[in-house]
Structures are given as structure tokens and as C-alpha cells.
Image: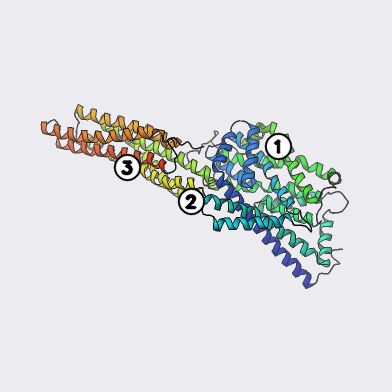
Amino acid sequence: MIKSLMLTGGDILTIINSAFFILGGIAVFMLGMNMLGSNIEKAAGKSMRRLMGKATKNRFIGVGTGAAITVICNSSSATTVMIVGFVNVGLMTLTQAASVIMGANIGTTISAFVMALSSVGGTQLSIAAVFALVAFVGFVFTIAGKNEKLKQIGTILEGVGVIFVGLNVMSSAVNGMLDNPNVETAVKGLFTSLGNGDKALTWEIPVLFCLGALLTGLMQSSGALTAIVISLASANLINLEMAMCIILGTNVGTCVTSLISSVGTNVNAKRAAMVHLLFNVMGCLIFIWPVAFAGKYIARALSGIDTQWQIAIFHMVFNVLTTAILLPFLKYLVKLACIIVRDNKGVETDDAETLDIRLLKTPAIAVGQARKQLIRMGEDAFANYKLSLEMLLKGDLSKRKQFAETENNINATNKYIVSFLIRLSLTEISEIDEKKVSSFYRVVSDIERIGDYAENIVEYAEKIVENHIDFTDEAKEEIREMDMHITNLYKYVYSVFSGSDLSYTPDVEREEQETDRMNNIMQQSHLKRMTEGKCTPEAGALFLQLAVNMERIGDHMHNIANSVKEYGHGAIYTES
């Protein structure tokens, strides 16, 4: 029938114009999805951190967390990419990640109901028209809003509205194409040949399944393809059986994004991506048989409901039942992923010490991870300071190599953190996180300077050993007392910065003043010892330089604690 049908040049132009509008509708739809997801994540940064914390409790909470985060981000692909990043930096174990991934598949089904809702309206005021108005209201908020919160709400409203506008464009393009009788006959004939008749699907199942997987993999969005499927269903071009096959394919195709994101990660992150693939493939294998042998009976059971709603219901039932069936076998799923993705060294690697650029997709989490990396860098710098002072007081340079390795690590970490912060500052982050990132630039510089002063102290130790210089017992006692105050200062600064807890600020101020006082005492005592002839000029010069360097280390620690005041609130501020 299709071969005998001749399409005129006008018919072909109708198809081309409709295809362009469909592609434009997809672009508008994806733009709305990105606007909504990124701005809700930006507004709900703390809530997302709390959700991630709850995911560590048990597998059921993990499923709920995955579903909630996917609803927030409006994308299961974004959630799974985040999870791969979390596993890579040690924020989540592989077992925890598996349950969250299962929940993400449930959360993404909300999108299908949103798309089905867009078709409601008929000759009355349509849902799409209402949300087009919502998009305009959001636009007004963004240009007229005087504060950041109102503008953020406006952008969220814009995103919601634009999603429905994009869906309406796609639906209108399909219906417009079918207004041409010749095109309608040709298109319906094509889909009828693929199984849109009364006969049960047979060979068409793998074709439609692979089509769904391939297009989703190319578009890297199951939501976009689901929107197209619902548009075709609204125009009666495909039935529920065909839609079910394509939907099954989208669940496998969406794994492409997480697999790509796992490239260059540690072994556990690769396993998390594999868990996602295994879960979706197994779910499809479970449901492909009911679709093949009972698809038309399922369609008849739901015949009283519009096809687009049937698709949305099937999408949710499929993912909920798959999770319910496979959740009890979660540990075995993880073990299978470990067997497939082997660790060449025979042990699990841990790259939790690094910053993962995948976390930039969730700036609120990325800010927290940047803080953790700064804390680790600070620990290295303080450890090197203590090591340098030990070499100086003992006159033993045997640990110079250890010191040099740590210093090289500090310098490399400094460059990497700065690079990460630059990328992070270019993302859409909340006002409070923007202040944190701004302060982190200065913190990383302060930590790096502490490492430099430790290097100076090592140089003094080398001069002492080379020139056989020795400090008096009184001078050594003053050095140890100064070190005691610097150590106490570090302890309080660590408490302030790691927990954003300003209640330790008085302790920080007290110990910093003590380092200033000790610097003055050391200089005055030095002059007294020089006058009494107890100290050589060479030893005196090194002693004075040491006192100044130790006091400046205290100053930089003080700066780190003060940086928290830029985003802390009240006497005590604890980050969720």
C-alpha cells in the first residue's frame, strides 16, 4: 500500500516542515527540562545534601532518595551521572548507589505523566496554554524581580512553562502533518506495517526496542523520546503495544549517559554505571515477554484510558515492579557488577582524595566536596609544618624526602582546586554557595602559603645542620611554646572551617593573639641573649626568621577561620 502511494512535492514539504517543528519542539522541551532541573537543584542544594545523607541508611530509603532527587533534577540521567561521581569520590558506597539508581528509574516516570497532562484540553482552555502563561509569569519575575530568590522562582516557572510549550509544539507539528490526507495515509500505513494493527507484535518487538534504545542513547534523554512517543500516541499513530516496546528500549538507552560518565573514574564508579545497565536490562528481559504475548490484552484492559495516559501508567508500573522484583537481590546485582568490572589490582581502589568534575552537575554537592579537599590540603600543610619543625629541633634531615613529596602534593592540589573552583564558579549556584566559592579561593592561597613557610623552616634546619648551629635550651623552649599555640590554633580553625561552626571563633582569636605575643617574646628574649653573649649571630638570625615564619603561619590559619564569617550566620552556623 505504501509503495503504491505517490507523494507530491507539496506533501514532502509538509513532512519536512513538520519534522523541523518536531525537532524545534524537542529543543524547547529539553531547554525547559534543563532550566527547571538546574534551578530547582540550585534552590534545593541543602535539601539534596540531606537526601544524600539519608540514602546511606538502608536500601528502601535509598530508593526513595533516588526517586526524589530525580524529580528534583527532572532527569534520571542527571541523577545517575551524579551517583557515579559520588561513588568516585567516596561519598557513597556501591551498594548505596545501587538502591538510589533503582529509585531514579521510578522518579523519571513523573515526566511521562507531565507529558500526558500536556495533551489535556481539547476545545477548552488547554493545559499547555495555561503553562505557556506560567512561562510568561516566570519571565516577568526574572526581569522585574529585585532579589535573587524571586528571580530563581521566575526561572523555575519559566522552565515548567517551556516544557509544556515544547510538548505542544511537537504535538501540533504531528497533527499539522496529518492534516494532509496523502501524508496521513502514508504515515499511518508505515506505522500499521510496524504492528499498529490487530495482530500481535512479533518481529517488530526487537526493532522497536532497539529503536528506543538507539535514539535515547543518541539524544541522551529518555524524557525527550518519551515525549515524542506520547505525541505519536496522541495522534493515534502508534498503539500501546508499540509504545511499550519503545519505552523498554529507552530504559536501556538511558544507561549510555552513565556509562560515558564513568570513563576515567575508579573501579567502583564504573561498577555503579554497570549496576545501572544491569538493572535496566534485567527489567526489560522480565517485561519483554508480557509485552510480546499479552500486549494486546493489556491494551484492551486499559482501553478506556487515552493512549498517552496508558503509556504513562505502563512506564510507572514497569519501573516500580522492576524495582520491587530486583531490590531483594540488590547484593547479588552488585556482586555481578563486580565480576564484570574487575579490579586489575585485585583490591578496590579509592580515589576519594580527588575532586570529580562530574560533581559540577550538582554544584551544592561540589561545594561541599571542594571544602573536603581544602581540609585535606590543610592537613598536609600542617603535617609538613610539624615535620619541618621536628627536623629543625632535632637537627635530623632524614625526612626531607617525605617532606618534599607532601609539598609537591600540596602544590598539585592547589592547582587542581583552583581549576575546579573556576569551573564551579561558572555554574549556576546559590548565593550562599557563591560566597563559599569566593572564600575558598583565598583559603587555598592561605594553605599554600603555610606550606611555603614550612619550606622556609626546612631551609633553616638545613643551615643549622650544615653550619653546626645550635639553639640554647631557653630558645628551644620558646619555639615549643609557640608551636603549642599554633597547634591549638590549627585545632580550632579546623573545627570552624570543617563544620562552618563559628562558636570556636573566640578560641581562634585567643590562640592567634598568643602567637603574636610569643613572636614579640622570642624577639625580645633573643636581644637579651645576644647582649649576654649566650647566642651566636648566626643562630640569632635563624631564630628571628623562624619566629616570624611561625607567626605568619598563625596569621594564615586565622584568615581561614575568618573566611567562614562571609557565609556563616550567628554565633553557630552548621551546614546541613
Residue 512: horizontal and vertical position, in percent? 31, 35
Viewer-side label of 3, 2: 2
- Note whether 336 is above or below 37 in the view shown: above
* Residue found at x 23% / y 30%: 478
* Residue found at x 55% / y 58%: 143
Res. 343 visible in picture: no
Res. 24 visible in picture: yes
Q: CA distance from mark 1 to mark 3?
A: 54 Å
For residue 423, the mark is 2
* Residue found at x 59% / y 47%: 40
The residue identified by callout 3 is 452
Q: Nearer the viewer, residue 294 or 37?
A: 37
- Note whether 135 is above or below 389 in the view shown: below
Q: CA distance from mark 2 to mark 1?
A: 36 Å
In which quadrant of the rendered view does residue 1 lie? Answer: bottom right
Q: Secondary structure at mark 3?
A: helix
